[in-house]
Image: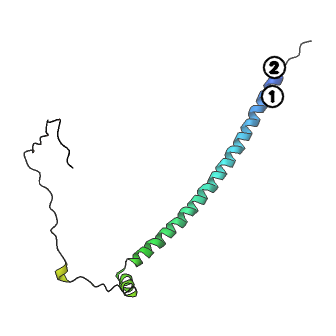
Amino acid sequence: MAVRFGPAVKASVLCLLIGGSGVGYVWQKEQIVRLGYEVKKRETRLFALDKDNEKLRKQLASLRSVDYLEGRIKELKLNLAPPQSSQIWCLPEPGADVPTREPVQQFASRNDHSTALP
């Protein structure tokens, strides 16, 4: 009497495919939820860092203010004062270099024994 294993093997393979698909679906959903939590956590951290950055930007602006600096000068007794007009030098703004119409030729020495500058 011959025993047929074909239908049993087919049923086993079909059950494994369906079971594996179910496990994969649940794992994928769990990964999506976990990544959603990570995104939310990082968005919260980004918001906190933006808030700290704005607070530090305001603090920097107040530390750079003239009133604060003058107060610190008096507090530290540095005896600083604004410069007098005779102490200020006004330098002319450098103009843009106007290119010449003819290219300037540059030459290099062909001497292989050129001396290095100290």
* Type of the residue with mark 1: Ser
Image spot of residue 87 (x, y percent)? 19, 80
* Type of the residue with mark 2: Gly
**Nearest to the observer: residue 55 or residue 104:** 104
- What is the tally of numbered marks visible in this picture? 2
Q: Quadrant of the N terminus?
A: top right
Would you identify the image quadrant in which residue 27 lies?
A: top right
Compute the Cα span from label 2 to label 1. Answer: 10 Å
- The crowd level at tag 2 (other Cα within 10 Å; few <14, some 14-19, many 20+) is few
**Residue 32, numbered label:** none
In the rendered image, the vertical position of residue 73 relative to residue 8, given as above or below: below
In the image, 71: left or right of 106? right
**Residue 12, numbered label:** 1
Image spot of residue 97 (x, y percent)? 14, 56
Would you identify the image quadrant in which residue 18 lies?
A: top right
In the rendered image, the vertical position of residue 19 relative to residue 49, given as above or below: above
Q: Residue at x 64, y 49 (%)?
A: 32
**Nearest to the observer: residue 94 or residue 27:** 94
Which residue is most to the right? Answer: 1
Callout 1: SS: helix
In the image, 42: left or right of 65? right
Q: Residue at x 60, y 59 (%)?
A: 40
Residue under label 2: 6
User: Which of disc 1 and disc 2 is earlier in sequence?
Assistant: 2
Q: Are marks 2 and 1 in contact (CB under 8 Å)?
A: no
Would you identify the image quadrant in which residue 102 lies?
A: top left
In the rendered image, the vertical position of residue 60 relative to residue 71, given as above or below: above
Q: Residue at x 84, y 19 (%)?
A: 5
